[in-house]
Image: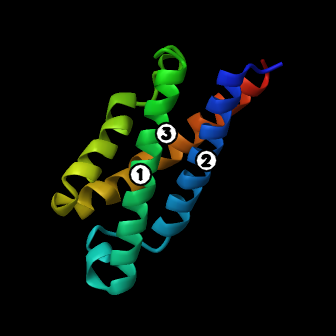
Amino acid sequence: MLNDKDRMILSTLEDIQTSIELIIQRCEGIKASDDFLDEEDGLLKLDSISMRLIAIGEGFKNIDKLSDSKLLTNYPNIPWKQVKGIRDILSHHYFDLDAETIFEICQNDINELLNTTIRIIGDISKK
């Protein structure tokens, strides 16, 4: 049976999973970073993906606090410092937002983050 902390972590992970899935959906059709900048629809996608990345970073920061920094270290395939750090960059330096960075995250990192998030959910649910 899950304790309160594990239930909170699980709920946060489920919210993170939803955000990652929305990012993947919104990245469809984006073939280059310029696609974010060429049309209004691209800018809307860039903004919404950035907000979801902020939420994901904040969520993983909260999970780290709730687990006393012990849970995420079990999944070393993800650069957790960067995942949590993107939140700070996007939140505090929004006008320096780099479409190329967001494009690279969408192309190279987001699917592995989704798979790992699903794996963590499964691992916690087995407790």
Query: In the image, is residue 92 above or below residue 35?
Result: above
Q: Position of residue 28 (x, y in %)?
A: 50, 69
Ranked by sequence position, the earlier of labels 2 and 1 is: 2
- 119 left or right of 85 in image: right
In which quadrant will I find the N terminus? Answer: top right
Q: Mark 1 belongs to which amino acid?
A: Leu
> Mark 2 and 1 residues: CB-CB less than 8 Å, in contact?
no
Give the Cα separation between the discs numbered 2 and 3. Answer: 8 Å
Q: Mark 3 belongs to which amino acid?
A: Gly
In this view of the protein, can residue 68 be seen by the observer? yes
Q: Which residue is mark 2?
A: 15
Residue at 36 percent of width and 68 percent of height: 47
Q: Position of residue 18 (x, y in %)?
A: 61, 53
Query: In the image, is residue 75 above or below residue 54?
Result: above
Give the quarter of the image for residue 42. bottom left
Q: Which residue is mark 1?
A: 53
Q: Which residue is mark 3?
A: 59
Ranked by sequence position, the earlier of labels 2 and 3 is: 2
Give the Cα separation between the discs numbered 2 and 1. Answer: 12 Å
Residue at 28 percent of width and 51 percent of height: 91
